[in-house]
Image (spheres, coloured by chain):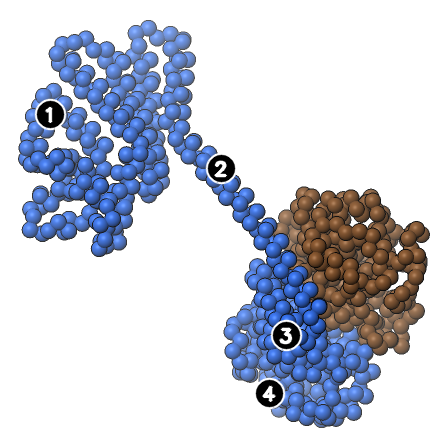
Amino acid sequence: MSEPHGTPGPGTDPGSAPTPPTPPTPPTLPTLPTLPTLPTLPTLPTLPASTAGLPVVIVDDHSIFRSGLRAELDADIRVLGEAATVDEAIALVVALQPRVVLLDVHLPGGRGGGGSEVIHDAAHRAPHTLFLALSVSDAADDVVRVIRAGARGYITKSSSGAEVSEAARRVADGDAVFSPRLAGFVLDAFGAVAGETAETTEELDRLSAREQEVMRLIARGYTYKEVAGSLFISPKTVETHVSAVLRKLQLSSRYELTAWALERKLL
Amino acid sequence: MSRPRQRIIAGVCAGFAEHTGLSVTVVRTATLLLILAGGAGALLYAWLWVTTPTATANPVRFGAAELPKASLARPAPGYAGSPGSRHGLGGPADAAAERAAAAASSARSAPITEILLGLALLAAGLTLVASRLGADIPLAVVIPAIVVLSGTALAWRQFADIRGGSEQHSSALLVRALGALVLVAVGILLFFVTSDSPDGWTVVIASASVLLGVVVVIAPWLVRLSRDLADERAGRAREAERAEIAAHLHDSVLQTLALIQQKAGPQSDAARLARAQERELREWLFTGTGTGFGTAAGTAASTAAGTDAGAGGAGGIPDVDLPTALRRIGAELEADFPVQFDIVSAGSSLGPAPEGLLAAGREAMLNAARHSGGPVSVYLETGANAVSLSVTDRGPGFRLDDVPDDRHGVRESVIGRMRRLGGTALVRPGPGGAGTEILLTLPTVPAPADPALPHPTNSTDFVMTTHLSGPETIEDPKNSVEAVHPDRTLPAAADADGSRP
């Protein structure tokens, strides 16, 4: 199962605005101008290790997956450490303060909360750390639970190393990472399929028309750049929309999301 | 021993005769004589009545030649419960025999009942005999004692029955249990009510005694209840542990399969095998429980399958909903072609998949599988007004010159079919000009399916309908290539339209 959205298509878009390009080896982490639409994003600190690439921590209970991912990640991704359980992960993230945590959704240990427990317990003690959820699961509750806990995106474990690297960079830049599946779920859960559209941009429980368009194209397997090209907007605008949707996904009290989470005792 | 079902009073004499080998007449006469001797016979009879289980078996089994009375004779419990006796019996008789065996074994396992009853009856008999002989019997003590003993015995007998697994009506059980409790309580109270010098202490002691008696009587139930509770809790813990292990295992397997696919390369047999296994496991894990993406929320209307009942051609897809049917098609095609279908569905698809749309979708997926050889995105959206399906591949694109046969296939089995169903189809280059994108839309409100009408009622649902009105649009490869840029503006508009209520 590939996640084509994560990698920019070979054909660059003519209408794309200048974006922070992330070719294989940028020696420094781009200190991005934080998006005004993303109040949750902390300003990127000047990391001491920024000269050596994007510092990440891999959290997964399968050592074979950790080592495989470590070997496949791009050269500009620097793996600070690995953790296998909830407790280890919390301690490691707090101690190392990585920029991005590649976080498995299912983890042993702790209180049994898995990846979302790590985010809950570690996020406030590592204020500059962002979480990217990795999962083999297709179950919506797993993914939405970890997103609602604060993960900035979700990709499946079948993604290639390059795709994971790209997603990690995207998350480090403050963007959200959506898979086609997650986009499909969002359209469903926010009533877009049934024809509901947000009236104002402030509304948390429904998607705006533009956000629906973006989500539909992502669900169809388009990359962000392709979405931008299809809608004649800049990739930055696409990212803004995706981030807005992620925020709604995290903050919305929409009935379907909560009812469904309650049904599975997630809250 | 056991009592036969056909009986004069309670079958005690017949049972006793059968058990001891004596003649029934002799036993009955002896019983009558004993009854005359101060009622001792009656007490004995009552005791045996209560303590002996009822025999159960088919009387016919013992020969029709015997007299009815002789056929009253029942085998001993051991015999009735023996495996041999159960063979060849009908269902009800068989069940009855089982119950008798259970009763017998339960009586054996709880001799306390018999002991208590025996003590009660023995006391009663001795009292009677003693009073006959003129002895001064403290009846005020003896009678309550007998009542208490009987009540306790009854209560414990209930417990033995329950533990023996014999099925009882809960109402009968309740009545008997209550009866036993009342007996015990009344008996204990009698002790004190009939005592010579009642005072304040008597009342206190009486209350305490009654409570104690009740506790003794219901103790077996309490023990049983707590034991059941502990069993259940342990069982639940085991279940949870097993589920956790299973979840971890599934995770590991899925991960391993993903790794194999990554390492083996998309075209290899190993990858294809791993993918098939992964899909199988996923289907079992996620779609069976209904927690997969696309099944959660949504208030979309049903897919109104009636629209394309006549279209046919889906071929062998049973009555499953559209996402499941598409997943199966994807699985079939992945087995034959080096492709990977990433199928996403939104909205709830109710009812069986509309056959015509499924057939057209299958053709579109087949086209992508044949020509792309890589990841193919399939997105299904079941909206309030229409079902839309998009198939996007990253292949070399739609080269009509190269594969005229397939073009014909797409034209006929995708575009033509959708038009006949009252829907629309659009074939165009994929995003960024690479690959092919096929968009199918089918209104859920049944539209008159008339092949003569080029534009069905839903033409506003899809802006590109005009492109499809004639096959010539598709036949000209130049046209489809040149249409890249105009086309690319359109999916958004089309989507926005589709999302309107």
Q: Position of residue B469 (x, y in %)?
A: 70, 89
Give amino acid for label 2.
Answer: Ala
The alpha-carbon separation of the residues under discs 3 and 2 comes to 52 Å
Front position among marks 4 and 1: 1
Give amino acid for label 1.
Answer: Ile
Whether residue B471 is visible: no
**Badge 3 and badge 2 in a common chain:** yes
Looking at marks 4 and 1 on the same chain, the residue that comes earlier in the sequence is marked by 1
**Badge 1 and badge 3 in a common chain:** yes
CB atoms of marks 1 and 3 within 8 Å: no
The alpha-carbon separation of the residues under discs 1 and 3 comes to 93 Å
Give the residue number, with chain letter if any, for mark 2.
B230
Q: Residue at x 92, y 61 (%)?
A: A27
Give the chain letter for brown: A
**Left or right: B485 with respect to B226?**
right
Give the chain letter for blue: B
**Mark 3 residue element:** helix
Q: Chain of mark 3?
A: B
Q: Position of residue B234 (x, y in %)?
A: 51, 41
